[in-house]
Amino acid sequence: MLTDELTYLKGVGPRRAEFLRKQGIINCRDLLYHFPRRYLDRTTTKYVRDLGRDDYEATIIGTLVSLKEVTTKRHRRRLEGSLQDEWGGTLKLVWFSNYTWVLQVYKVGERLAVWGRLNFSRYGVSLPHPEMDRVDATAALSTGRIIALYPGGRGYTRFGLSSRTFRRILYNLIKTRGTQMPPEILPQELVAKHDLLNWRTALRAMHFPRSQQELSAARHRLKFEELFLLQMLLLNARRNRSRQVSTRLAPKNAHLDRFLASLPFSLTNGQWQALQDIQADASSGFQMNRLLQGDVGSGKTVVAVAALLLAVGAGMQGAIMAPTEVLAEQHHRTVLNQVDPMQVRVRFLVGGQRKRERERILADIAMGQADIVIGTHAIFQEKVRFRNLAMAVIDEQHRFGVEQRAMLQEKGTNPHILLMTATPIPRSLALTVYGDLDLSLIRELPAGRKPIRTHLLSEKRRPEMMDRVRREVKQGRQAYVIYPQVEESEKTDLKDAETGFGLLSKAFADYEVDLVHGKMASLEKEMAMERFKAGETDILVATTVIEVGIDAPNATMIVIEHAERFGLSQLHQLRGRVGRGAHASQCILMADYRQTPEAKERLRTLTQTTDGFEISDRDLQIRGSGDFFGTRQHGLPALKVADVANDVKLLEDARAAAEDLFEADPNLEHKAHRLLLWYFETFVGSRVGHLFRVG
Ligand code: ADP
Ligand code: MG
């Protein structure tokens, strides 16, 4: 019954079924997992009279007493409604655009639940673009029932799929077919051990809870189930991968020895350990899939070069991919400097190279005339054929998607893969998005680095910022000034790099000020970066093109304009551009006075810590989950009930449980696991990206 299509279900029919299919709700099982977005009862709704300015969001139930289109003084049209609650309080509802459907669907006199972000002004409280749903008169809240509201919006409403309809369809489904469902799909042992509500009960309770306690037991159960199935998926993928045969690369060779001996510094412990991990993987005969995680400036590049030389030493090819041309170019130079004396042949491949040049490079790669290939996304293209790619490094891998990992797979004979990221991965993500990889960690920065001080300044302290920049450049140091956009725009009143460049050029007339941004030709960008790295430029005005990886140790100051506009990880990355040399560095965050609570929280976090791990944990908490970090982007199913940022303990339990399961019964052949296997293959395994597919 779980796999039954929806068309013949009471209350659905072909049109609705087709619409639901587009939303990814294909069969009865999907419908049961189409969970309410929120629940109404006496404790979750408010009366208008009780609303205060500290109420950010609210749900109100009342009668729609008016709904009409009006024209404002400025000749703009909009839709206004008024909702009256049982105490006579009225809440104004406003739509500024796209509201025709509202007029078609809702009528004055109807009893509705509305919710959304409140807006307070001197005219009172209003709710712009509310989410709404009908509330049955019979479902009187005073009886203490909890009522489920489902995800809705224009599309759903057009097909008459209001919460009331969903409740009716689900009620029929559960009543008439619910008994055909097995009471439990997880192994009984697991259910007992973790004290879980049984499956059938939990699904009923999600849609028709009898009490808040029952609801939370149901949620807990379904969270566990969701995380457990995810872990089964990941462990499976990992197992499949670790069986992939790959070239055996000797852990030592002359090239590598020479390279390590030539370094002007000694490796940190973390770098050594990472290298040892890589040597062990690459010589195992099976494919390496390793994630190297180390904060900005921790020296991942050296480890990457060493990994590439493992391939070169074996007479095979290595490749390193960077997310931007600027960064690829930087790697190109670093690698050339380091391996040129050894007659290692390095080729550089990016988009926009001349046809002749490109063809020559492609031929070199195909014929094995290139030992190391450095470049951007261009390397993934189909036309790029390697003779014998044995080691592929992806730098700043969080900027790439899974597809690229998969494409790489097709480039050679299962090359060893080293992914690198400066975004520290909180435990929760290490267990999910990266749960199928092995992990190496560089925890420390090279010795002698000075901590970066971070200051948060408001607009009126701009002169202070200018003074600080002046002090740095006077001492021969260099500064970055970062803007959120390239040029002036009518749509926003944000400061932009071009205008900033003009202003700073004037203010610092006796210094060299330069500009780099994403709309410049790549040669121009490279030259600007080179001049800055060579110390010819004092102040570099830039957009986030410099975000990743740029290494200029004499830069000791970074100013970020409109810091409130950037994400926490991004700010951390940007800040990581300084603090790379022997001199103390500082980061100045210029923030607009209008900030969302989240932005305030981000900026505060940044001034409090430079620890990337702490920052990434905070980042995840501030952003909350939803489609956290985009599980979908990583080819994993989206999570519906669990929230990896806040359910870490449950996540770890689920991981352990899945590990135990595979340990006891690797192919799920026991009778007690038969149903689980069927369920897993039917509803989980078959729906995910090929990287994670079972078998
Ligand atoms: P990231 O991990 O951010 O990619 P990089 O590889 O760009 O860091 O290294 C940052 C800087 O630190 C480079 O200038 C590099 O030469 C230097 N470096 C790397 N390892 C060490 C070390 N063990 N001791 C001192 N400096 C190092
Ligand atoms: Mg780097």
Image (cartoon, rainbow, N blue to C red):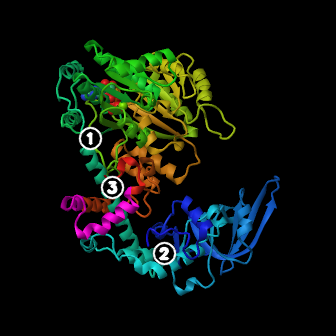
- Identify the residue position indicated by label 1 in the image: 441
Between label 2 and label 3, give the one nearer the viewer. 3
**x, y percent for residue 591:** 54, 42
On the image, which quarter does residue 266 sit in? Answer: top left
Between label 1 and label 3, give the one nearer the viewer. 3
Vertical position of residue 530 compared to residue 29: above or below: above
Examine the rendering and report whether any part of residue 554 can be seen: no
Q: Which comes sooner in the sequence, label 2 or label 3?
A: 2
On the image, which quarter does residue 609 sit in? Answer: top left
Query: Label 3 is placed on what type of residue?
Result: Leu
What's the distance in space between the residues labelled 1 and 3, CA to CA?
Answer: 24 Å
Crowding at label 3, few (<14), some or many (≥20) Cα neighbours within 10 Å?
Answer: many
Q: Which mark is residue 53?
A: none
What's the distance in space between the residues labelled 1 and 2, CA to CA?
Answer: 44 Å
Question: Marks 2 and 1: in contact by CB < 8 Å?
Answer: no
Vertical position of residue 261 compared to residue 90: above or below: above
What residue range appears in magenta?
A: 659-685
- Identify the residue position indicated by label 3 in the image: 233
Q: Which comes sooner in the sequence, label 1 or label 2?
A: 2
Q: Give the residue drawn at x 34%, y 27%.
A: 319
Q: Which mark is residue 207?
A: 2
Vertical position of residue 45 compared to residue 546: above or below: below
Q: Tell whether 218 sits left or right of 150.
A: left
**x, y percent for residue 513:** 53, 20
Q: Tell whether 589 sits left or right of 681.
A: right
